[in-house]
Structures are given as structure tokens and as C-alpha cells.
Amino acid sequence: MVVRQLGRAAATRAAVRSCGRFLRGSYACGRFPRGSYACGSWVLWPISARRVRVRQISARQLRVRQVSARQLGVPKLGARHQGAAPDRLLSPVPAHDFTLTPGPHIRMETDRLLAGGGHGDDGEPSRAAGARRMSYSAAADSCSCDGSSGEEDNYIQQAVVLIEDAIHYRSINHRVDARSLHLYRWYYSRVCQWLLGLTIAVVLLLAFVERPSSLSVSSDPRHRSVSWEPPCGLTESIEMICLSIFCLDLAVKSYLIGWEEFRKSKWLISYTVVISVSVIDWVLSISMVCDEKLRVRRLIRPFFLLQNSSLMKKTLKCINRTLPEIASVILLLALHLCLFTMIGMLLFAKTDDPKKNGEWELHFRDLPSSLTSLLVLLTTANNPDVMIPAYSQHRGYAIFFIAFSVIGTYCLMNLLTAIIYNQFRGYLLMSVQTSITRRRLGIRAAFQVLSCHRVQEASQKLVGVDDVLEVMARVKMQSYYRAAITTMARQHADAGHMDREQFTKIFDELDKDRIKEHPPLPQYRSAVLQRFQVIFSHFYLSVLGNAVALANILCICTVLVLNSEKSTAERDNYLLGIINLCFILYYLFEMCAKIFAFGWRGYLSYRNNLFDGLLTTLLMILQIAIYITYMIPNSHRDPSSQDGMPLWEMVRLVNMLIVFRFLRIIPDIKLMTLVASTLLDLVKNLRAFAGILVVVYYVFAVFGIWLFEGAIKPPPETSGPSNTSMENITTNFTMECGTYEQLGYWPNNFDDFAAAIILLYDVMIVNNWQAFMEAYSRYTTEWSKVYFVCWWLTSSVMWVNLFVALILENFIYKWDRSCSCSITDVERIRYQTSVQLMFKEQIQEPTEEELLCQLHQHPHLHLRW
């Protein structure tokens, strides 16, 4: 075994002394090049002069066989040497006294493992005929390759893939032979990943079509038409195609990482189980002619979405680790709820006077109703309704409800939110730390591979600039960052090579903000044109355009207020059309003036100009259509009688576009620019968090359909509105004020998947969510309240607050970085706001020793230092 000497000779001797008990019976330890040591199968890893890490690494892990004493050329420790001081046995000797050369017993494998090549009895991968291997010589601190030009090209290809892994924060623990690298790049190509994402979307959307189908205009059971039910085998065929793609996805992933890594991956093992269960359930559905009552595979479909996103898996792991941390606050909240429930039942007990039993009858009749009333009050959904009967009797009863709300809603609930965010943020930092380590590890591995490609003439490992440029030409990445990294690499063209620090530094460009440079202004020879160019390119022209847009909005508001009581036929649409035409002509003039001043390329390089120009063009086209249709041929005819789109509809569309165009003021206000860019970045960079919410919605909707499908059915149409006749239809029906039936919440149900999603959203908002909980508890059982409370805790208490906190993190991150910038700089800078960079300041960079340790443990790429 080979161990790198990380400290001084004294630190190494101290490490050996402290671990001398492990050396008895092992082979004599000699010094390898660059201060490395071999001590049987025990690794001595000196961290400092006083700290030692001892680890036993098997031959399979390091891919190095045990070497006998005769093969090493040193005697084995005999009986008379057993008591010798271990530091004498391991005393450093000059590097030329012991040289390790590549041979049949010490080999490092870097090429592909052929299909069917298993492991031998000694743990070494078996070699098929024609299998290519490369051996590395560790003599004289150099690394050389015994291979052909094809092998050298494989070095470049390995470095390309490792750099791509670093860019996308992917793990580098995959096969690195030529065939596997080609398959690996194909798998992570845009087309393949788009196809896999489309497959996941299709298999999730099947829930809207499957029985019970959501393909109806309304979800109200009183007005809903018969939904279209797909024939048996249609959705099942689509699902089987999706499952086949998932099987192919699993096979490719398993092959690329190898069997050893597959056995360690819980996600891939779970992936296998989920696919197997889905296939078995699919077979059962086909055998039962699609008439089964329960489809288990619908519940586990969201797993396909989870396993396809590494950030989503990290987020789920962080949430799972956060749950025990918040258990104490939830327990305190439950104690608070139970305590006030007991007090409330004592305060509002039933009395002999029926006039004073209003609070008891409505909210504190028994323990379940008391707990439910105060739990809903915790969300303020039934405030002040819950305290009105008691408050009308005595003012002092308000103290009870106010104390409950202040302690529970404003203290404990906010404290719970803070703890959820704080604990989750800590675990998220740990996960993001892993992502940053992956990037640094990929770059470090690429350097090591390229340094083996180059024949070393000095004691320091170097990579050629030409090799780096060739690698960057092949890497799939954004052109801006490729140009920046290539420019940094060409600065070392005079030396012709780069060391490790220089190589790592050029990839720091990946963490920098992108500065968008606008094209230069066109050059005009005429002095008059130059003067106009200065005027039209001035910032005040945009300010004037915003003022004109505001005046247009005010005119539209005035006309709408004056015509609010008139029907569409009574309105004077010609006047509003003429007013809009005047403003649209100015918008067209402003657009042409900016094109003249900045040129076509310069005008289109501004995102606000793209937005403004597109809407101005649409407005002009609509206005021309209005003029041609209603003004020229027959201006005295009633526009409402014309065939096609009426005049009012066209004018209304123009007004809506004008109002929407007023958003052009956003880039001119710094705070609004940051807010708008934060919202856009949330769509791009926080999709993993929204994906977890989609998964939770999906699972709870499926459970809701299983539990409550068809539970609430509206009564048949009756001739009179009498409450008594209604109650005679069903004992569960009631028309009391504030109930599900009285409020007309019939469209909110669990009769199909789409309706279940909407109902869960209504409960998440917690406005009148007690009406749903109370209705389903009447029509089914009191235990149905557990379902709604669990959904409220999951969605409203935990996830929504967590999502809001992450929005704040994103905004604060951008605000801190742009507080010293002007409005123009904010528009030019495209901030890199990925989750990894949002927490970069709190993340500790991995050390060189940590990176080397992880590279040593790579299952397929074996390098020696």
C-alpha cells in the first residue's frame, strides 16, 4: 500500500510510533518516491505532528495487490525484528534507494472494463482479451503513459468529461474508458435529458386522464358532464413505454457507475424497486381489464421526478433531517393547544341557561370540536367568528382568545418557522458543500489526468496550455464562460504549461457574474445625425417614454371609469381608439429613434427594448386592423354588428397590451429590477424546491382520492328552499351558515385528480379551510381531520414558509451584491444565483488533502502521486 507523506519527517515518525502495534507481522516498510510509505495494508495518514489518522484499506479499494517481501526486495519482519522500534524500520531513506516501477504486481487501471468482465478471486478486475491498460510510472516524481495516440486522445476525453462534471456539480465516480465516456456524454446531452424529462412529465400527467378522469369542463358534481374515460389499454400502453424508458435509464446509470457503486446507491436500489412494483401493478391492471379499485403505482410515480434531480434529492434529505429538530416545537405547540382546549372547555361548559350556551354549542361541545376550533383559530381562519358567542356575553372572554392567538400564532408558529428555516439551512449548507467539493474534485481530477498526458521534466506536475485549450474546445458549456476560461488559459501561452494552482484558478470564472457587453454605437459622419444620435441615446428619452406610457394608462383608467355603468354596445369605442392611436404612434417613434441611435444589434441587446419593441409592433398591427376594418369601408355601421371580432374586443385587447407594456418601467428602477430578476431566478434556480412541493401535492391528492372519492354528493334538485326538506334527504346535509353546503363549495372535492389539487391548494391558503375539514368529517369519519391537519402542517406551516425564506435568501444575496452598482450596471450584470453560489460565502473550500483522499477512492480512475 502507498501512503502520501503529508507532513514533515518528524510527523511521520510520530504517526508510526503511535501505530506501531499494527506493524507486527507486516512487511518491512520502505520509502517510495515523494515521501510515500508502504506498511502492509495499514495506511498511516499524518495530518499534523500531533494528529494521526489510521485507516486500513483493502487491495480492492486501491487496486494494488499485496507484494511479498521477495518481490519488494526487502526482508520480512522476523521474530527478532518484532520488537524493533517502528520508527527505525520506517526511517526515511533517499528516494533513489527505493524505486517503484510498473510491473505485473503494481498496476493502476484507467481504461474501460469490458462487458462481462467480473472480479477474480483476489479482487482484481479480470482482463478480457484485447483490453487496453495504461501503466503509470512513479519514478523520479514523473507520470508517463505507455499508450498509443488513441490512448492520448482518451486522456483528453477524460479531462473533458471531468470538467463537464465539475460545471454541473456531478459526481465523477463513473467509468472513464472511451466507450463509457461516449455513452456518458450522450446520456447527459440536452436531447437525452429533455427526453427523460418529457417521459417523467407524461407519466405524472397520466393521473389527469386515468379513472377518475379530470377531462370535464367543471368539477361541480351538480353541473359536471360525464367525463371521457380512456379505453382500457390506452393509458397503460403509454405508461409501459415510459416504464421501458425508465428501465433503460436505470441500466445506463448502473453500467456507468459500476456494480460496486450501484450497491452503495440507495437511490438506484429504490429506483429498481419502484420500477419493479410499477410493472407488477401494471400487469395486475391489465389482467383485471383496468377495473381495479386501487393503483399503487400512482402513489409512487413522483419518485421518478425526485430521482432525476440531484438537488431535489439533497433537498429531500435536508427536510428529512430537519424533522427531528422541530419535534420539540411541535410538541410545545401541541401542549399549548391542549392546555387552552382544557381551559376553554372549563370556561364554556354547558349551563342551565340556553342563552349562554352559544359558545359551548358551536365550538366547545366536546373534545374533538374544541381541539378543531382552536387549531383553526391558530391559523386565524375562523377569527373572530369563534369568539363572538362568548364575547357577546362578556368582554372578558376576549382575553382567552387573544392570549391563545398571541402565544400560538404570533410566537410559537413564527418560532416554528424560524427553526424550520434555520435547521434546514444548516443541512442545506452541508449538501451544497458536497456540490462545491464535487466541482473542485472534478477540476482536480482533470488536472491530474492531463498531467499524466504530459511528460514531466520537472519535479512539479504541469499541464500543457495546448491540451487545456483542446479540452475547452470540446467541453459543452456556455460560450461566455468558455471564452473567459480560454482567455485566462492563453495568458500562460508563453510558458507553454500551467501548474495546479494556475489550472484551478482559470476555472474560477465559472463562479463569476456574467457582464453583458453591448455592441458599439453606429458611427455617422454627418454632424446633424451625430447630434440626433446623442439625443436619442440619452437616458431622458426613456424617462419621457415612461411618462407618456403613464399618461396613456391614466387615459384608459378615466375612460373605463366613465363607461363603467355602460354596456359594451353603449360605449364610444372610437374615442378611445383615437386616443390609443396617438400614443401608439409615439411608441413607434420612440422605437425607431432608439434603433437609429443604437443600431439593430445594440437595440436588441437590451432586454427591455425587446419587450417594448414586441408590444409596440403588436399594438401597431392591431391598430391598423381596427382602422382597416371599421374606419375605411363603412365608418357609420354599428361595430357590434360586424362579422368577426367586434370593435370592443379589439380595443380591449389593445388596452390590455398597453397596460402590460407599462412594465417597461421596471428596468429603470433599481429595486424593481432586483425584484423582477429575483422572481425570474426563482423559476430557474429553485425548481428543485418547487419540485418537492409538486411531489407532496401529488401524493396527498392520490391519497385524497383513495379516501374521499365520491364522499360528498349534492342533494337532488328540490322545489323549495326549505332547510327541513334538505335535511330529510340525508342526515349529513346541513345549510348552516359557514358550512360547505351553504358556501357552495361543491366544485372543491376529491372526485378526480385536478379537483383534488385545487382543494389542496385552498386548504394550503387556510382561508375557510375548516369548512372542508368539517364537511368531510361529517360525511366520512372524524379521523378524516388527521388528513387535513397533516396537509396543513406539510404545506402551509413547513413548505410555504421554507419557500418564502429561500426567496428572501435569493433577494438578499442579489441586493448585497448590487447595492454599490448603478441601474445600468444592474441591467448589464447577469448574477449567477444558483443555490450553490447563494451560500458560497458560508461554504468552506475543500483542502488539497481532502481532494486527494477522494481521488484515491475513485472506483474507476486510479492515479498516483
Image (cartoon, helix red, strand yellow):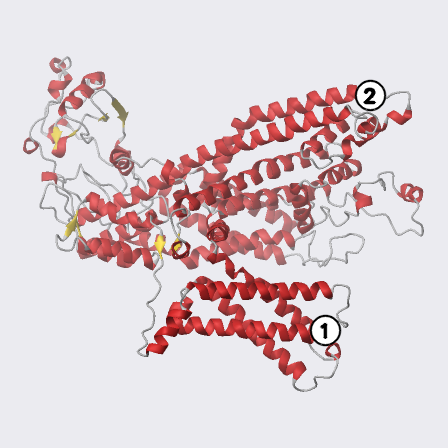
Specify few, some or many for label 2: CA neighbours under 10 Å numbering under 14, 14-19, or 20 or more: some
* Residue 349 - label: 2
Considering only vertical position in the picture, is 93 above or below 199? Answer: above
- How far across and how far down the image is residue 186, in percent? 37, 56
Considering only vertical position in the picture, is 456 above or below 20? Answer: below
Q: Nearer the viewer, residue 399 or 752?
A: 399
> Which residue is painted at 69% across and 30% down in the image?
375
For the residues carrying marks 2 and 1, which lies nearer the camera in this image? 1
Work out whether residue 645 can be spotted: no
Secondary structure under badge 1?
Answer: loop
Q: Which residue is mark 1?
A: 572
Q: Nearer the viewer, residue 596 or 174?
A: 596
- In what quadrant of the picture does the N terminus appear? top left
> Which residue is painted at 51% across and 31% down in the image?
322
Mark 1: amino acid = Asp
Q: What is the CA distance from the residue labelled 2 to the residue labelled 1?
A: 65 Å
Mark 2: amino acid = Ala
Image side of residue 678 versus residue 693, left or right? left
- In what quadrant of the picture does the C terminus appear? top left
| Disc with the residue nearer the chain's start (2 vs 1) | 2
Q: Nearer the viewer, residue 28 or 448?
A: 448
Using the rendered view, name the quadrant where residue 627 is placed.
Answer: bottom right
- How far across and how far down the image is residue 498, in percent? 17, 48
